[in-house]
Image (spheres, rainbow, N blue to C red):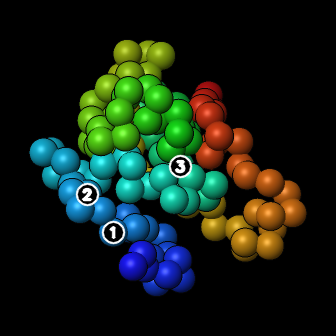
Amino acid sequence: MPLPLAFAYRSPMHAPVPDPDPIGPDGTVRLRCYLPHIHIHYFSGTCRQCQRRVMIGIELAIQMMGSSAATAGELEQRLKCRCGGRVSLSLAVDDRSPETVERKGRLPQTMGMVIRE
Ligand SMILES: [Zn+2]
């Protein structure tokens, strides 16, 4: 029997859903673990060289990696800033209330890529 959503959802900072193999060989979480909450989760990265910020939705991240079994760490390895610098990545959560998300819609960064100069 699948777990009720409320149970799986208690901690938005961690992989929200039980996965038989959630951690990849590099010790970071597989992208598919974030799929149930793509409307509020996204990856937020900062260039270690020029501090440019990049935000990437979960679906786009999976598309970029070609597999939902790819990990957040592999995504970080893959990312390169326009300046050639490496990008430090972390998982970010839309912390608006569920009512606001419903009313105003998803943040642009959960649906694609947003770059802030
Ligand atoms: Zn840069």
**Position of residue 4 in the picture relative to residue 75 (left or right):** right
**Place of residue 114 in the rendered image (x, y in percent of width and height, measured from the top left):** 63, 33
Q: Residues within 10 Å of mark 1 (few under 14, many from 20)?
A: few
Quarter occupied by the C terminus: top right
**Place of residue 28 in the rendered image (x, y in percent of width and height, measured from the top left):** 24, 51
Which label belongs to residue 18?
A: 1
Residue depicted at 38% across the width and 22% down the height: 80
Q: Residues within 10 Å of mark 3 (few under 14, many from 20)?
A: many
Name the quadrant containing residue 99. Answer: bottom right
Which label belongs to residue 95?
A: none
Quarter occupied by the N terminus: bottom left
Residue depicted at 30% across the width and 42% down the height: 69
**Place of residue 115 in the rendered image (x, y in percent of width and height, measured from the top left):** 60, 30
Q: Residues within 10 Å of mark 2 (few under 14, many from 20)?
A: some
For the residue marked with disc 3, what is the amino acid? Answer: Tyr
Instruction: Indicate the secondary structure of the residue bearing disc 2.
Output: loop
Q: Give the residue pinned by disc 3.
A: 42
Of 19 and 49, nearer the camera is 19
Instruction: Indicate the secondary structure of the residue bearing disc 3.
Output: strand
Q: CA–CA distance between discs 3 and 1?
A: 19 Å
For the residue marked with disc 2, what is the amino acid? Answer: Pro
**Position of residue 43 in the picture relative to residue 102 (left or right):** left
Q: Give the residue pinned by disc 2.
A: 22
State if disc 1 and disc 2 touch (CB < 8 Å). Answer: yes
**Position of residue 43 in the picture relative to residue 65 (left or right):** right
Residue depicted at 76% across the width and 63% down the height: 101
Name the quadrant containing residue 109. Answer: top right
